[in-house]
Image: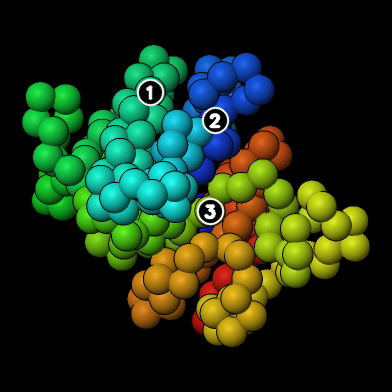
Amino acid sequence: MIRYNRVVLKISGEAISSEYGVFDINIVESLVNEIRIIYELGVEIGIVIGGGNIMRGGEFSQAGFDRNRSDYMGMLATLINSLLLEQLMNKNGVASIVQSALPIETVVESIDLRKTMAYLGEGKVVIFAAGTGSPHFTTDTAAALRAREINADLLLKATKVSGVYDKDPVRYSDAVHYPTLTYEDVLSKDLAVMDMAAVSLCREKKIPIVVFNIFEHGSIESIIRGKNVGTIIKE
């Protein structure tokens, strides 16, 4: 029995890269297989993928580049990742379509929420590219915004670690894992989970956020079935 019927999955760009290059097709196909499990359960799925494996607008702006132009470059990086994911999803039997927050009609259709809801109703996965379409906002914020727009039951934040900790578990062996947190906990403790705008957007609509390790096989299905995986952030 599934607990969540409509979700938004946020994936970082870094999650699909490896030491061998910007894209690691094996990693992407493994990710697609995890998504396919809940797709075949009938869950309606929206996806937001970052572009950090290609470039980060914020890092370029810190190097002296114009922030607005740098952020648009980052948005285009998310579009490249979205198109890659779409192709591999369709190839592996997961019907998908990309919608972009930036109008690039030759390549992809723009976000139209009426079409989005129709696609979800038809059983297609909708991949939202180009963040919010505006500079100065992260893809985390874009994921929270899309979750609100499509009335998602849950926002899934895929990471390389098993949830939220009081400090970086990769660097500190004594890092403490939080199985549950409130929105206020995240905001008041300034935990590095998602940016504050994203958490606030979810709090206003009471959309739970689950932070989990995308590389743990079956984790997405377990979450959808209501099992305790990673860290859940809720009211």
The residue type indicated by label 2 comes to: Ile
Q: Nearer the viewer, residue 210 or 14?
A: 14
Q: Position of residue 23 (x, y in %)?
A: 51, 22
Q: Earlier in the sequence, mark 3 or mark 1?
A: 1
Q: Residues within 10 Å of mark 2 (few under 14, many from 20)?
A: many
Q: Verify CB contact (< 8 Å) between mark 3 and mark 1.
A: no
Q: Position of residue 96 (x, y in %)?
A: 31, 30
Mark number displayed over residue 145: none
Residue with the mark numbered 3 = 157
The residue type indicated by label 1 comes to: Leu
Q: Image point 30% across, 39% down: which residue?
A: 73
- The Cα–Cα distance between marks 3 and 2, rounded to whole angstroms, is 14 Å
Mark number displayed over residue 16: 2
Q: Earlier in the sequence, mark 3 or mark 2?
A: 2
Q: Residues within 10 Å of mark 3 (few under 14, many from 20)?
A: many
Place residue 26 in its image quadrant.
top right
Q: Verify CB contact (< 8 Å) between mark 2 and mark 1.
A: yes
